[in-house]
Amino acid sequence: MIFYILRRFLYAIPIAFGVSIVCFSLVYIAPGDPLQTVMPPDATAETIEIVKHAYGFDKPIPVQYLIWLGHVLTGDLGMSISTRRPVILEVTDALSNTSLLALFAVPLSFFIGYTMGAIAGCFPGRWLDRLVTGTAVVGVSLPNYWLGIVLVVLFAVEYSLLPATGMGPSGSTNFHIFEWSSARYLVLPVFTLAMIPIGILARTTRAAVAEVRNQDFVQTLRAKGLSEWAVIRHVLKNSLPQVMAVMGLQFGYLLGGSILVETVFTWPGSGFLLSKAIINRDVPVLQGTILTLSLIFVATNLIVDLLQSLVDPRIRRA
Amino acid sequence: MSDIALDKPLETFDEQAVPATQVRGYWQSVFYRLRHDPATLFFAAIVLSIVLAAIFASLIAPFDPYKESVISRLKPVGWKDHLLGTDELGRDMLSRLIYGGRVSLLMGVVPVLIASLVGGVLGVIGGFAGGRINTAIMRTMDVFYAFPSVLLAVAIAGAMGGGIVNGMLALTLVFIPPMCRVAETATTQIRSLDYIEAARATGAGTLMVIRYHVLGNVLGPVFIYASSLVSVSILLASGLSFLGLGVRPPTADWGLMLSTLRQSIYVVPFVCALPGAAIFVTSISFNLVSDGLRTAMDVRM
């Protein structure tokens, strides 16, 4: 087991380096001189020279990468062009707001999606299965930013039950989870965000459960006289690793996909930060946010792999 | 055995013999299954009509999608001759929706096609060559896998600065790694099978083996996976437009229309929801057709 954990860690390191290289090159695929995208447009030629030297832009690209990596490892992601604040502060502020959404959206979508898929998989072909598969397809094909807009129209415009956008009544700065006056701002974004993972998870779980149910050992369990509930418990346990892999991917989706939902609800999280960075052509913020989110995603996948190997010892030996 | 009573002379049995069972070929049985799958046929018809509407937009659209009118801004459904109302610049919604299908379909199909080609070739090379070449290709793909797909598309399109070509390029890059993985898995699975070895033993070169034995087994999964990606691509593309990273105004595009009409949800809520409904219907139709094809072609992935 320890050997497996070590191997997985060693495997994640080159991936993380690859991710950092891709993020580093974002500045270079931006049209124009990389420095121009980092500097304010009204900078004088003199300041440009100084900054060029200070940031090492006059050195060869591999050296520039190492310098940049050194800065990143010490927590320096550069300065935001639009707000003149360090990118790392912008990103951590935004991330705390996004994690608030994820805190509710992840358990909600995992629970509903898994339950729906498990029920459908245990009763294939029945009306319940059809209902679940239908709902799942809708969930997968729904543009979630549109769902957000429709929900705003229904609940905020037509019936004024819930607030349309934002993270609290205007003027208030702190968010209290346990007070309905601010918690109600969470309801619509969380539900919108959870919709796609629910669909994908229900689909995957249904397929995984149906596949396991067709395996020989299930017949053996029945032959041995186990009750249907006990059989289902075995089936669910055996389908879990496959489902967990998808849950890991969906966690990443919730991080990345939140960009559209947060834009619709103007929720000041990492996705909203990204979409602001795009509008302002703020490449340092774009780069820093994407680097942070991707590294979190790499870490999540690592954790999911380790959890999978806990549930299914066969994975450890593979 | 003489106690078996025969009420007919033996010869007649020959004529009555079971009629030669019709053996269907692979494609025949695929079409047979498709013909008997009304749901898939229904959604295929929707996909077809969306495609036709986009192609013949100039013939079908009742109005010029770019003709603005100050007096008829943000009118509700059915106002005068505007069946689906007008947008914030007084342009006819129905016409814009019909024209908008062009961009959405283009951005849904082109990236998937290019990615299938590039990813498929890389996957077959990696799977067939094995060893270091495989490791080099697949580990590079793993790096791109480490990005959530929306994030990667936004990152590339955001850095390059939007536009329809950059958007398509970003989506292509997003789809190459999963495509490559599908092709690689299929190739690796059959590479070590006996008949490949037999083909080799009879003197077939690498290209011959790939052309006649590998491709036939890889194209099925690649095609089915690609068809399922079209709906993802349409969703991602309109997401990019929604963020301002796709087509530029005044081009009619569902994602962009949704984004500009967002400001007007208090005025004409129903009209503002229409572009999203178009995206949803297109995406779910492609999704279900892909599901139906997978079942009919009996492809397991």
Image (cartoon, coloured by chain):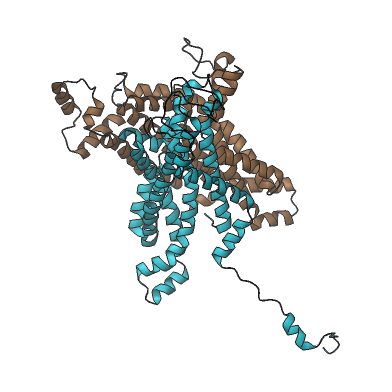
Please name the residue shown 70% across and 54% down the image: A221
For the point 55% across and 54% down, the residue is: B294
Q: Could you say where residue A128 lies in the image, as x and y percent from the top left?
A: 70, 42
Does residue B191 show up? no
Instruction: Look at chain A in the picture and name its colour.
Output: brown
Q: Position of residue A103 (x, y in %)?
A: 53, 27
Image coords of residue B140 (percent x, y): 35, 48
Residue in the picture at 25% in, 27% down: A38
Residue A81: percent from left, percent from top: 29, 22
Q: How many marks?
A: 0
Depth check, front residue: B159 or B177: B159
Relative side of A81 to A256, left or right:
left
Q: Tell which residue pokes out farthest to the bottom in this image.
A: B2
Vertical comparison of B248 with B71: above or below? below
Task: Give above or below for B293 relative to B27.
Answer: above
Q: Is residue B56 or residue A118 the one in the foreground?
A: B56
Farthest-out residue, top: A171
Q: Colour of chain B?
A: cyan
| Residue B153, quarter of the rendered image | top left
Residue shown at the point (46%, 12%) measured from the top left: A173
In this rendering, does residue B76 appear at all?
A: yes
**B300 vs B293, nearest the viewer:** B293
In this image, A84 relative to B77: left or right? left
